[in-house]
Image (spheres, coloured by chain):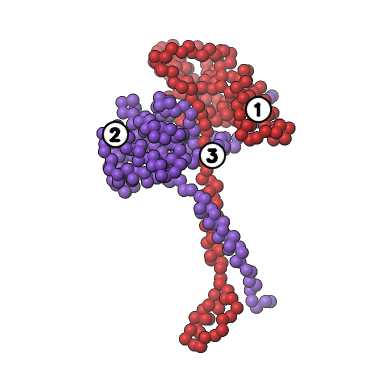
Chain colours: A red, B purple
Amino acid sequence: MAEIIQEEKGKGGKKRPKKGNPHMDMTPMVDLMCLLLTFFMLVGAFNKPKVMEIVLPDKIKKDQKVDPPKIAESRTLNIILGPDDKVFWYPGKAEAGMPLQVTNFSATGIREVLLDRNKALFDKIDQFKRDVISGKLNIKQDSLANAIKQLKKDDDTGPIVLIKFYKTSKYKDFVDIIDEMSIVGIARYILVDINWIEQGMVESALGMSKTAAPLTKK
Amino acid sequence: MPTKSPRIDMTPMVDLFALLLTFFMLTSVFTPQEPAPIDTPFSVSEKPKPDANIMTVVLSADNRVFFNVDNGQDTILHYRPQILKEMGKRYNIEFTPQELRKFEKYPSSFGVSIHDMKKFLATNDAKEKAVFEKGIPVDSVDNQFGYWVFYTRQINPAVQALIKGDGNAEYPLVKKVLDVLQDYNVSRFSLITNLQAVTVDVTGAKK
């Protein structure tokens, strides 16, 4: 910089032969570029939303006559999502007055319940993934997803999870429970409407006094 | 003690910086601001969001429904104005070419009833626009949201449905939206989430 100022001072005088290459102080420019570079790098890295795909079955039209699918009672697991991140669950079929188990979305909550029932399939998928990583099995990345899908399809021991929502549950619960399904590798789950027996069960579990007798219709 | 400070030739570094800066500037895509703040929940899914052929349903924390649809793979396709035109036909509202163009260029999602759309497009002020953003009606009496989905799928059959919801949106609204999507034969859709890695403790489960 000093050189440039000197040259300006010498304006008007006789022309001097140019010195070598004048040095410019590039530090501010480099600072600014560094800052912008960091900004754009971070914006690019943190701006990638992910998506979670779910598929719902086709709706049965009112005039269509379809027999409800038969599900083994012993394999069903009912999950009801309540308010304040509470997760209620019970196995089998609902009966009035049945107590609900209360748990939550933590690692030792509903995940443990599901893992316990889905251990066979989870271990199979886990083993399969490990084989792929260690190189025992050599398959492409996109066929890995298909292979896991096939494993899930062939499974006939894991639970059939019926997911129900109490009216005060939030969108977060909806995402969380589907997320749990994919973490644990549940092969069969479905979203169903809550019925009045279960509503009564939830309300009595929450300690709402007015619905203490769950047999009364809503 | 040296009298002159030593000089380092910074030119290669600056060159590299300029190159990287240009690269990152060109590759970064700015997502436009949503009209309502959306705090998406976390999941373990690592699938990236698709870039084109998407319609997004936005559910805000105060239970309003917003809708957004893109122009398709190429802006030449002009899907957005076509969809608005069909919507206008349905509700007997004639949109001028200027309004259609404005709608095409509008970057973020909208939560406006079709009857307010003309006024909404006429104003440029963000505050005035916010007055009309009451959410798209989804009830069975006035199911404008259903028609948006219907016409979007009619004009762009390759469209994929995305749901971007705030964690605090209430489930009954989510259920309503899912029902509408199912009614219009959209059974495969994706939920936009943030990535959060989870490790499952296998040994703990085996005990």
Residue B148 point in image, percent of width and height: 36, 33
> What subunit carries mark 3?
B
Three-letter amino acid code of the residue under disc 2: Lys
Could you tell whether A155 is left or right of B193 in the image? right
Residue picked out by circle 3: B48
Residue name at image x 56 percent, y 22 percent: A188
Q: Earlier in the sequence, mark 3 or mark 2?
A: 3
Residue A146, compared with residue B12, is above or below; it is above
Q: Give amino acid for label 1.
A: Ile
- Quarter residue B84 falls in: top left
Residue located at (53% from left, 65% from top): A29
Is residue B92 placed above or below A121 in the rendered structure? below
Q: What x and y, as percent, mark residue A155? A: 62, 20
The picture places residue B98, in percent across and down from the top left corner, at 30, 46
How far is mark 1 from mark 3, CA to CA?
23 Å
Q: Check the residue under mark 1 and report the chain it is in.
A: A
Residue A41 lies, in percent from the top left, at: 55, 52
Asked whether A167 or B118 is in front, the reply is B118
Disc 2 target residue: B89
User: Residue under circle 1?
Assistant: A125
Disc 3 marks a residue whose amino acid type is Pro
Q: Look at the numbered disc 1 and give the secondary structure of its residue.
A: helix
Q: From the viewer's perspective, is A96 left or right of B90?
A: right
Front label number (2 vs 1) = 2
Tag 2's secondary structure?
helix
Question: SS for tag 3?
Answer: strand
Residue B15 got which mark?
A: none
Q: Are marks 1 and 3 on the same chain?
A: no
Work out which quarter of the rendered image holds the C terminus of chain A and state it.
Answer: top left
